[in-house]
Image (cartoon, rainbow, N blue to C red):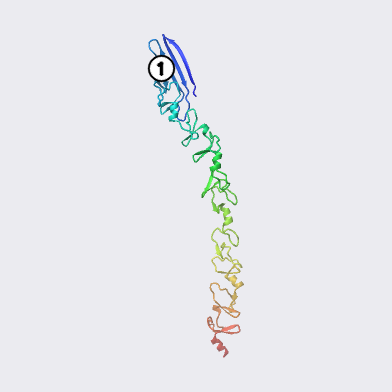
Amino acid sequence: MAEVVTTTKVTKKGGKKTTKRIITTETIESTDGLEGPVMTMIETNENKENLGGEYTKAMSKDWHSGHFCCWQCDETLTGQRYVLKDDHPYCIKCYEAVFANSCEDCSAVIGIDSKDLSYKDKHWHEKCFLCNKCQVSLVDKQFGSKMDKIFCGPCYDAQFATRCDGCGEIFRAGNKKMEYKARQWHEKCFCCCVCKTPIGTKSFIPRDLEIYCAACYEEKFATRCVKCSKIITSGGVTYKNEPWHRECFTCTNCNASLAGQRFTSRDDKPYCADCFGELFAKRCTACAKPITGIGGTRFISFEDRHWHNDCFICAECKGSLVGKGFITDGADILCPECAKQKLM
């Protein structure tokens, strides 16, 4: 309660007696504008000729004592504590009944002698401003709000704080958060799953819920050349569903590039036409050159001898024997007419 001090002073001037009664009223601070220190002065004039008068000085004005009253109930405020609201004085009882807030926790009125703590249009007594979970006081402490309830920092974090997809720990105030497709990480946890280097603002590649830096992704998943095992960054050729660098796709025998060239294979190895003919092809009985069959080349076989189509001709008249009857004469082949003439 505010302390009220009363002082009485009596003086005599010219046969007149003046009594001044000074009443000092202390004002309690309030979030709703409780007036600063209030000085209420009541002066009584007494003499032989008149009955005297009494007045009150408040709000920088002079009032008849009976006129300085509560705006709500008209009870006198002389010598009483009061609260200003919208420039009107109210007694403590009326002010608390009309304007004071109710405590969110205990539902009691938060009087002017109590500290009113507020958050999001809700109010508490100082003693009622507690964590909903552990009941520790939240006065002058950080707190969080969830579902219209307030919690101390540790309780809020334990129940509601989002957690890092990397380490599983919560995000505390001031932590930088990295997010990608509904997932989130501490900055230090957002790193390549292979080399553990923080990604930061660098490019990355996600795969099967893992995060890779570009270098590690290429090392682990990029297409590699069958021959040299190095990554194919551009171009390349495919042979038998396997990738090759263009410069690596060469003849097995002479190492000449086969990219864009005709080639054939033996035992799943590629050869240029020349090397394949020299190493594996049948040879023409007439010209002794290899018969490769590359490009749809036709050839004729008879017993253990073979000819290019263009080389399968009569030894005498040089006429083509392809699709015709012929007669062998030792190493030679003859058309029927030349064979008949040779026998005559």
- Badge 1 is on which residue? 54
Q: Residue at x 51, y 32 (%)?
A: 126
Q: Residue at x 59, y 83 (%)?
A: 332
Which residue is more in the foreground, 48 or 232? Answer: 48
Provide residue 79's location: percent of width, then percent of height. Answer: 45, 21
Q: Secondary structure at mark 1?
A: strand
What is the tally of numbered marks visible in this picture?
1
Q: Residue at x 52, y 47 (%)?
A: 179
> Which residue appears farthest toward the left when viewing the image?
49
Provide residue 164's location: percent of width, then percent of height. Answer: 56, 46
**How many other residues sit within 10 Å of disc 1, few (<14), some (14-19) or many (≥20)?**
some
> Which residue appears farthest toward the front when viewing the image?
107
Task: Report whether 49 appears left or right of 324.
Answer: left
Which residue is more in the foreground, 289 or 136? Answer: 136
Looking at the image, residue 278 lies above or below residue 145: below
Q: Quadrant of the C terminus?
A: bottom right
Which residue is more in the foreground, 142 or 273? Answer: 142
Provide residue 231's location: percent of width, then percent of height. Answer: 58, 58
Q: Is residue 8 visible?
A: yes
> Which residue appears farthest toward the bottom when viewing the image?
344
Q: Amino acid at mark 1?
A: Glu
Q: Residue at x 42, y 15 (%)?
A: 44
Provide residue 43's location: percent of width, then percent of height. Answer: 42, 16
Looking at the image, residue 336 lies above or below residue 273: below
Picture quadrant of residue 55: top left
